Image: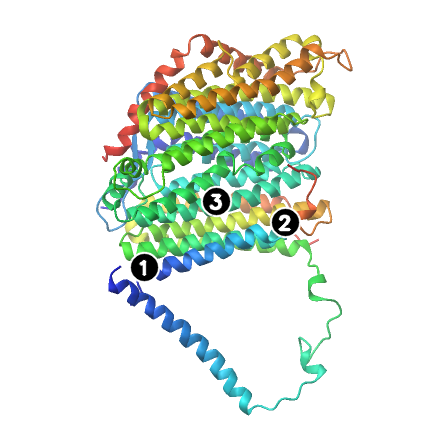
């Protein structure tokens, strides 16, 4: 029997958050078309409400332990195919991305004040992009994954180039598009081999299908892995695929930069886990046997991680532009998360949890930092580090919050960032990658040098003006939430690490549970 | 490697050789018989008709042509989804109908956007 | 008849040509065309694997990736037009406001 509406209604709840976002986005689009030019911030507040509704949906589903697969059947065929999976991993990643999108929307509403341009578009493009990001974490099928990735990418290109009168923004949009398009092509090509080898696009059925093919076709697995790593490396912005990031981060409007560095990055890691780790677990397992002839996949991931920590931190040292510095900083941050990704095949269950923990904390501290950057650079009309001079005297609370976020990004003890790095590196040691963990620790010390340059500017350099900064209520709440979150999870990390640890177990069930 | 594998490549090589041989062979055969009298008029892009004023790469088209082309490509390609839907329509029941109309409604919103932004009007 | 190998080889050749073009051409629209070529190389792979592997998923994937490619082309052309309108730019090399 083909699926009838009645058959499938019970499963639609697995896509409920996405449907809320898409439906809300379309309504926002129509409202925006009908509104006069002055009142576009209404669309922004509406979008905020939509994202809040989606957060509620995911939270309620988590509370009720809703989980399972959205399945379909080809007409005339028997057997069900998975398209969407809702497990704890997907739910936690969705929550991180939705909260990130919520904070970015608050920044965006502020950013558009006193500006002309495509204001309404920027709000609902964020909604559509977030839908794609959620799909990347939720999908149990290569096709859904690919569509989700593009649904995130295409609005992101437009968002980066949205300030049409600003030449830098134009260039950022075009560069992001050209590099992103290359990455998409590489990912699609890699996926085609993954499909050819396993004979299915179903990610749940894939590992076992791959395990049966393995000894004969090892070369093609390495090809698939190489192309997927190339493409996903672009999307996650890790060295040596990071060239676009500094340019795009600098040229894009600041809220969009925050969006790229938080939501896009988290979505990239969610997708990497789904497509670069889980299907290749049998391949990695085969690598430990004596007979294998393929590439050392885990070592390659580890090398990319070291390169990004090294390259990101080293290049950030000599940056003058705050947004550009944060581009390199987030390249280095992606390197730390890659440590978790590289440790995953050896230590799957626990490491998935530590990765989710770090990404959640990263979202908080990076959004907090970008809120401050938005305020300061907008008030000064200057994106260089000098704009932060004397902030400690001009706006002490803001300077304090920014300091907390910076220290956490560097991994200072009693902040959440410290625990995030601690968990990641200790699981790397457990997965026989001690050298990687030591490299990560040494390289993260470098990062303090450039984070302290901000702190030096704020507390030890005389400001050009003594007036306090203009702030708005929404962003103040966001910054306060981020700072309190970073401190709270720094003091009691178990509150977050508890649920994150459970991720591993639920997430691995994908391997053997074919319902 | 099984013999069948190389056998399949043999077909490809055969096609390549035949294709190249056919093209060059026919052109070569023709050059044996045809008269060869070059003149300046024969070298122009359009032997009869308008004389080109500027180099081809200097010609600039109005941006609106691109916008129309973009609109066309998008709506043209979306119909790709409607063909399989129409073929399987009988067996998709109400579910398929509702799905297709949701899809069309989304396209309609896109069209409304283009309309409101005056893409459809030639100024 | 022709086996799977030649199709995959054709895909690989197309992908390589596209990648070479995308990395060497200086005109953004040419780069865009090369990217489309790379996407189509993957599509050839999908159709070939689907036809030889017996599952129809690959052909469905191609429909989706074709549509995505069209959307990508539309987005890309719009961004290129945006840059052209503001500045008289012919080549990627002329975009030097942002540099690493």
Question: Residue A61 location, x and y as percent?
Answer: 35, 23
Location of residue A135 in the rendering, given as x and y in whole percent from the top left corner: 41, 35
Q: Chain of mark 3?
A: A
Q: Identify the mark at residue A96; answer none if there is no mark.
A: none
Taking the image as drawn, is residue B76 in sight?
no
Q: Are the residues tagged 3 and 2 within 8 Å (C-beta)?
A: no
Picture quadrant of residue A4 = top left
Residue at the spot 62% in from the left edge and 45% down from the top edge: C79
Q: What's the chain of the residue with tag 2?
A: B
Residue C4, numbered label: 1
Q: Is residue C67 left or right of residue A213?
A: right
- Callout 3: SS: helix
Residue A299 visible in the picture: yes
Q: Are marks 2 and 1 on the same chain?
A: no
Q: Which residue is mark 3?
A: A184
Q: CA distance from mark 2 to mark 1?
A: 46 Å
Which residue matches tag 2?
B119
Dots 3 and 1: beta carbons under 8 Å? no
Relative vertical location of residue B52 with respect to residue A360 in this rendering, above or below: below
Q: Secondary structure at mark 1?
A: helix
Tell me the quarter of the image containing the C terminus of chain A. Answer: top left
Residue C82: x %, y % from top left: 66, 45
Q: Are marks 3 and 1 on the same chain?
A: no
Q: Residues under labels 3 and 1: Cα distance?
A: 24 Å
At mark 2, the secondary structure is loop
Viewer-side label of 3, 2: 3
Examine the rendered structure and indicate whether residue A90 appears above or below residue B25.
above
Marks 3 and 2, how far apart at CA: 29 Å
């Amino acid at each position: 029997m083909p699926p009838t509406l009645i058959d499938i209604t019970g499963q639609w709840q697995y896509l409920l958050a996405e449907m809320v976002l898409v439906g809300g986005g379309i309504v926002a689009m129509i409202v925006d078309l009908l509104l006069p030019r002055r009142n576009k911030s209404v669309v922004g507040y509406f979008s905020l409400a939509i994202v809040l509704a989606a957060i509620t949906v995911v939270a309620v589903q988590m509370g009720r332990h809703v989980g399972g697969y959205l399945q379909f059947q080809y007409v005339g065929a028997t057997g069900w195919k998975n398209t969407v999976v809702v497990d704890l991993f997907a739910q936690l990643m969705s929550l991180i991305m939705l909260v990130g999108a919520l904070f970015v929307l608050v920044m965006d509403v502020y950013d558009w004040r006193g500006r002309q341009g495509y204001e309404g578009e920027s709000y609902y493009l964020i909604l559509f992009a977030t839908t794609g990001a959620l799909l990347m974490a939720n999908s149990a099928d290569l096709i859904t994954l690919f569509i989700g990735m593009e649904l995130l990418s295409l609005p992101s290109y437009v968002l980066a180039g949205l300030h049409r009168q600003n030449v830098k923004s134009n260039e950022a949009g075009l560069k992001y598009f050209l590099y992103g398009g290359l990455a998409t092509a590489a990912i699609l090509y890699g996926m085609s081999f993954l499909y050819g080898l396993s004979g299915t696009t179903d990610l749940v059925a894939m590992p076992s299908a791959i395990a049966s093919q393995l000894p004969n076709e090892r070369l093609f697995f390495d090809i698939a892995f190489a192309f997927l790593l190339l493409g996903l490396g672009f999307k996650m912005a890790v060295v040596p695929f990071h060239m676009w990031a500094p340019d795009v981060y600098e040229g894009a409007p600041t809220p969009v930069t925050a969006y790229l560095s938080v939501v896009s990055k988290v979505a990239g890691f969610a997708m990497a886990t789904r497509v670069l780790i889980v299907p290749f677990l049998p391949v990695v397992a085969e690598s430990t046997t004596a007979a294998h002839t393929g590439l050392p996949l885990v070592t390659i991931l580890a090398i990319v991680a070291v390169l990004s920590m090294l390259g990101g931190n080293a290049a950030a040292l000599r940056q003058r532009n705050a947004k550009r510095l944060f581009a390199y900083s987030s390249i280095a941050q992606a390197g730390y998360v890659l440590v978790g990704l590289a440790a995953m095949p050896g230590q799957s269950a626990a490491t998935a949890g530590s990765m989710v923990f770090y990404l959640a904390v990263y979202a908080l501290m990076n959004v907090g930092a970008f809120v401050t950057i938005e305020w300061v650079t907008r008030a000064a009309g200057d994106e260089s580090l000098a704009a932060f001079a004397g902030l400690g005297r001009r706006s002490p609370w803001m300077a304090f919050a920014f300091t907390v976020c910076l220290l956490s990004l560097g991994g200072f003890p009693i902040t959440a960032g410290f625990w995030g790095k601690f968990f990641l590196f200790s699981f790397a040691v457990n997965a026989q990658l001690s050298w990687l963990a030591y490299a990560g620790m040494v390289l993260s010390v470098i990062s303090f040098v450039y984070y302290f340059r901000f702190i030096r500017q704020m507390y030890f350099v005389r400001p050009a003006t003594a007036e306090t900064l203009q702030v708005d209520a929404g962003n103040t709440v966001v910054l306060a939430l981020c700072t309190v979150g970073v401190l709270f999870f720094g003091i009691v990390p178990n509150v977050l690490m508890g649920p994150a640890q459970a991720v591993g177990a639920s997430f691995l069930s994908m391997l053997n549970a074919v319902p | 490697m099984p013999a069948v594998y190389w056998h399949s490549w043999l077909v490809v090589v055969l096609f390549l050789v035949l294709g190249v041989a056919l093209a060059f062979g026919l052109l070569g055969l023709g050059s044996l018989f045809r008269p060869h009298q070059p003149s300046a008029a024969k070298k122009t892009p359009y032997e009869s008709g308008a004389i080109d004023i500027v180099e081809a790469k200097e010609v600039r088209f109005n941006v609106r042509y691109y916008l129309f082309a973009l609109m066309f490509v998008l709506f043209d390609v979306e119909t790709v989804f409607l063909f399989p839907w129409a073929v399987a329509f009988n067996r998709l029941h109400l579910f398929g109908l509702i799905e297709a109309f949701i899809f069309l409604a989304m396209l309609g919103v896109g069209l409304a956007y283009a309309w409101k932004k005056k893409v459809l009007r030639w100024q | 008849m022709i086996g799977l190998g030649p199709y995959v080889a054709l895909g690989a050749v197309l992908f390589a040509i596209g990648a070479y073009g995308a990395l060497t051409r200086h005109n953004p629209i040419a780069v865009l065309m090369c990217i489309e070529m790379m996407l189509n190389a993957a599509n050839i792979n999908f159709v070939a694997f689907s036809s030889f592997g017996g599952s129809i998923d690959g052909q469905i994937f191609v429909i989706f990736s074709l549509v995505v490619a069209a959307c990508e082309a539309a987005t890309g052309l719009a961004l290129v037009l945006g840059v052209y309108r503001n500045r008289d730019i012919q080549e990627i090399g002329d975009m030097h406001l942002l540099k690493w």
